Image: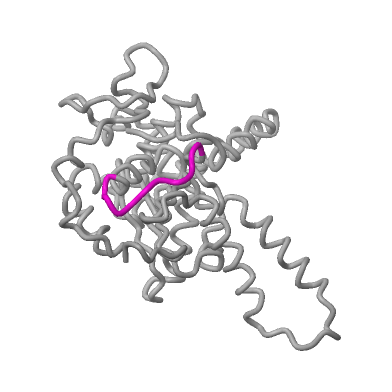
Amino acid sequence: MLGDMRPADAIFILGVTPRSGTNYLSALLCSHPDCGPAREPVHEDLFLQHAHLLRAYTSAVRAAWDPDWGEFQDDLLDRLHETLGEALISFLWVDRDRRLVTKSPSVQNLGFFFTLFPHTRLVILIRDGRSVVQSAMSTFGWDFDTAARLWADGAEEIRRFDETHNGSGLPYRIVRYEDLVTAMEPTMAEILAFLELDRERFDFTGAAQQPVLGSSIFGRGRSAVKWEPVAKDASFAPLDRWRAWEPRLHERFEWIGGTSLRYFGYEATPARPTSTLWPVRQRLLDGRWRTRRLARRAKYWSLRRLAGVGTRRREGG
C-alpha cells in the first residue's frame, strides 16, 4: 500500500464529545510508521460537525440544474458528495507517503459520514459519560446537566448509527476509551487489524508509555490544565474520578444518560431507582435546567459549538 496511497486510505477518529480520548487514540495511531497526522495546525478537522451546511449546499445546486439538460442519474449527488469528501481529505493530507489520521471530538451528522467519505475507515470513540462529565466540569467549568446532556446526545447519535448500520459491512468500529487504557495491546491489535495496518510495525511497548496530554487532573497541580506531555505514574487514574460523586449526581446522570451508558456496556451505579417520586424529582430538575438554559441561552449554545469547534486542548484523562 505504501507508495500508492489514495484518499480512501484516510483514517477518521470521531469522539462522542470533547474529553473522550481522541487525542490519545490519534497519538497511538500516529506512532505507527505508516500513519501521519493532518496538516498543521488543524488538530481537529470538524468536517462532519458542519456537514449539514455542505448537504444543504449540494441540494441547492442539484435543485438548480435544469432538467432540460438531460437525465440526472440517482447516484449523481452521491458522486458529488464523494468528490467533495476527497477534496477535504486532500486538504488535510500532507504526508502522501503515509496514511492520514484525522480526528474530531464530535459525532454530529454521523449518519452523513459515509456519504462524504464512503471508502475511508472510521473509528468511533466512546467513553463512560460519567468520566466525560467529570472531566468537562474540571477542565471547562461546564455545569453537570449540560455536560451530561451533551454526552447523552452524542451517545444517542452513535447508538442510532450503530443500530442502523451494524452488520452492513460499512468500515467502522466503535472503541471504548476504557479498553484502550486497561487493555491497550489487545484493543490496539484489533484496531490495527481493522485498519489493515501491520501490527509488526507497531511499537506496543512504546505505546504503553505514551505520555498524558491535557488531563483534567493528572500533572496539573494547582494550575490550569497542562498541554505539555506528562509521563504517567501510578497516580494516573482517568477512569474512576466520578465514583466520588454524591448519590444525587449518580441518580441525575442515570436519568439523563443511563440507557446509553448500558448500551455501550457500562455498569450503571447505582441501579436505576424504582421510587415513584424519583421521576417526579428528575422532571422538576429538568425544568429547572431548562429555565437556566433560557436565561443563559447564549452560553449554552456556545458550549454546543464547543463540542465540535476548537483546539486540540479537549482530550485527556
**Residue that appears at 29% across and 23% down:** 218
Of 267 and 197, which appears nearest the observer?
197
Name of the residue lying farthest toward the top: 222
Residue 126 location (% of width, % of height): 37, 49
When asked about the image quadrant of residue 129, the answer is top left
**134 relative position to 283: left or right:** left
The structure residue drawn at horizontal position 40% and vertical position 51%, both measured from the top left corner, is: 101
> What are the residue bounds of the magenta stretch?
31-41
Report the side of 313 relative to 193 (left or right).
right
Residue 114 % position (x, y): 50, 67
Task: Give yes or no for residue 201 being in the magenta stretch.
Answer: no
Q: Main secondary structure of the magenta part?
A: loop
Quarter of image, res 74:
bottom right
Whether 251 is drawn above or below 97: the answer is above
| Front in this rendered view, residue 125 or 78 | 78
Task: Determine whether 13 is above or below 291 in the image.
Answer: below
Relative image position of residue 124 (x, y in whole percent) = 39, 55
Whether residue 277 appears in this view of the structure is: no
Q: Nearer the viewer, residue 305 or 34?
A: 34
Asked whether residue 37 is drawn in magenta, I would say yes
Left or right relative to 280: residue 66: right
User: Which residue is at 41% across, 50% downward?
Assistant: 95
In the picture, which quadrant includes the N terminus? bottom left
